[in-house]
Image: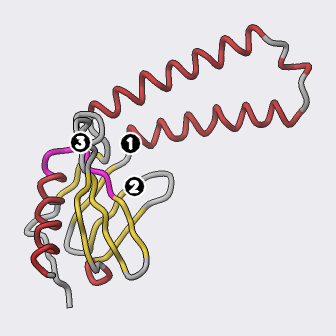
Amino acid sequence: MQFYQPQTSVAGPAYGRGFKLFASILTLALLGYGTSIVLRFPLLQFGFGVKALLLAAAGMLCVSYYWFLRAETTIDAHGIRQTWLYDKQVEWRDVRGAKMIGIPYASWLFPPRMVVRTGNSFTTFNGGSQEVLVEFAKISLAFQMKR
C-alpha cells in the first residue's frame, strides 16, 4: 500500500541557478589554476602516477560540473528520481519517512533537500525549481502527519 501519491508529475532541475552559477565560477577558477600550474611546472618530468592523478582530477571536475548543470529531479506516481552520474530512485512503496532539511541563511545557494528514509538507508534528493520544492514540502508534511 502506498502512503503518498502526488497529484501530478513534477520535474525540474536538481540544482538552482545560484548553485549553478557558483559551480561555474568555481570550475573556471579551478581550471584556470590548473592551467597556471601546468604552465609553471615541468609536469612532463614527473612520474606517470602524478600525471594520471592530475588528469583524473581534471576529468572528474568536468564530469561533476556537467552533471550539476544537467541533473533533473522527477516526482511522479512511481516515486522520486534524480539523474546524475548515477541515477537515484526511490519508489513510494519503499518510503518509510521523508523530511526537508536546509542550511540556514544559505538557501539562495543550497536550497532545502528532501531526505527519504527507506528501511535502513537514507537517500537525498535536490530540488532546484519552485515546483519541485513545493512538492518536497507536500511530501514532508504528508510523512510528518503519518507519525
- Quadrant housing residue 147: bottom left
In this view, the residue in front, 80 or 109, is 109
Residue 95 image position (x, y, % from top left): 29, 78
| Callout in the foreground (2, 3) | 3
| Relative side of 111 to 130, left or right | right
Task: Say the numbered circle drawn on residue 70.
Answer: 1
Residue 99 image position (x, y, % from top left): 23, 64
Q: Is residue 53 above or below residue 136?
A: above
Residue position marked by numbered label 2 in the rendering: 83
Q: Amino acid at mark 1?
A: Arg
Residue position marked by numbered label 3 in the rendering: 104
Residue 82 image position (x, y, % from top left): 35, 58
Q: Residue furthest top?
A: 40
Gap in Å between the C-alphas at discs 2 and 1?
A: 8 Å
Q: Amino acid at mark 2?
A: Thr
Identify which residue is drawn at 56% across, 22% down.
30
Q: How crowded is the residue under tag 1: few (<14 C-alpha within 10 Å), some, or many (20+)? A: some
Q: Secondary structure at mark 1?
A: helix
Identify which residue is drawn at 38% across, 82% down.
119
Q: Secondary structure at mark 3?
A: loop
Mark 2 or mark 3: which comes first in sequence? 2
Q: Is residue 141 above or below residue 82?
A: below
Residue 140 within the magenta-colored segment of the rendering:
no
Q: Amino acid at mark 3?
A: Pro
* Quadrant location of the N terminus in the rendered image: bottom left
